[in-house]
Image: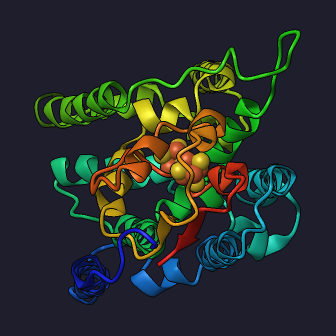
Amino acid sequence: MISNRWNPVPRIIFFILTLGLFTTTLLADEAGAKDSFGFWDVMLMPRVWVGFIFVLAGLWFLNRRMVTKNFRLISLVIIFLTFGVFWLLPLGEFARGMGLHPSPVCAVTKPGLFIKAGRGFPVVFAAVLVTMAVMSLIGKKLFCGWVCPVGAGQELVHGISFGKKRDNRFKIKLPFKITNTIRTLLFITYFIVLIFGGLSIYEYFNPFDFLHWGFPFWATVVMIITLVSGLFIFRPFCYLVCPVGLLSWVLEHFALTRIRLNHETCTDCGICEIKSPCPTIPAIMEEKWSQPDCHACGRCIETCPEGALEFKR
Ligand code: SF4
Ligand code: SF4
């Protein structure tokens, strides 16, 4: 028996949310928001449609159980280079269209600054938000797992094993209740500081700033801290800080595709829980509706000797 058999509610919410997000942004665009970019200008940017290609490819690979450890490693390098480095190449408009403006964190946090300054809600931010939201609704965190270069960088360093036995003894799985509380409190603090101080606290710890490759001191420090802690903790910035991580975690509850457990073949051996890097597996085994973030990395699928974990509808 596959868990979570046909349940129409998440699908209905998925379609309502998707349609709602697109329609709201289109209406804002047609209402003539004073923006240098319109909705479709953003949607036709290379990084948006290339991002959708990566998301659909990731979904296809996951669904066909092709994401082995080495496959994932190569995918992460490609994701990092494509969305974090490619725009530096002298390849004209296409390369420029792959740049990180606005970055995922800026797309969430900058609209508040614009609204506070009385400059409205620029459509460019709305379009990027809609893109990330729709990707996260197609499958759990497909944006974070198959597009985001900061996520890819963290997951890459987490794959490095050290110590004499080169096993997982130095890897720490922080309790999700704690990490999600910290991430939520930061988001609440962001709103309070924004309202009373007109600032975004995320400007002080945004590793995406590093990917402009100008090596400013503070962004470099933040990136180093992110990657060094990533050696021990799976995606520390995603679980502890990132506002996109928090919002897409809310959307994950309505995602169309996700990791499913086949109870008929599962022997309860617990190997997937030990070998998976995330804190999500216990909640998947218990079929909890609300689960820790799943970044659609696919590592758990390969770890199961019975093939009981699948990424599907
Ligand atoms: S949570 Fe944030 S940093 Fe992590 S993968 Fe998603 S957007 Fe990127
Ligand atoms: S290992 Fe964790 S994050 Fe990766 S697909 Fe499985 S549940 Fe999701």
Outermost residue, left side:
196
Nearest the viewer among 131 and 100 is: 131
Left or right placement of residue 76 versus residue 235 in this view: right
Q: Against 199, is 93 above or below?
A: below
Nearest the viewer among 90 and 274 is: 274
Outermost residue, top side:
164
Q: Against 75, is 134 above or below?
A: below
Nearest the viewer among 207 and 196 is: 207
Nearest the viewer among 219 and 279 is: 279
Q: Residue at x 54, y 64 (%)?
A: 142
> In which quadrant of the rendered image does the N terminus lie?
bottom left
Q: Is any part of residue 49 visible from this angle?
A: yes
Q: Residue at x 67, y 62 (%)?
A: 307
Q: Quadrant of residue 311?
A: bottom right
Where residue 300 sits in the image (x, y, percent)? 63, 50
Q: Against 151, is 169 above or below?
A: above
Q: Residue at x 64, y 21 (%)?
A: 171
Q: Quadrant of residue 166?
A: top right
Q: Residue at x 50, y 77 (%)?
A: 42
Q: Is any part of residue 100 visible from this angle?
A: no
Where residue 303 sits in the image (x, y, percent)? 70, 48
Where residue 245 sits in the image (x, y, percent)? 41, 47
Where residue 109 sits in the image (x, y, percent)? 33, 46
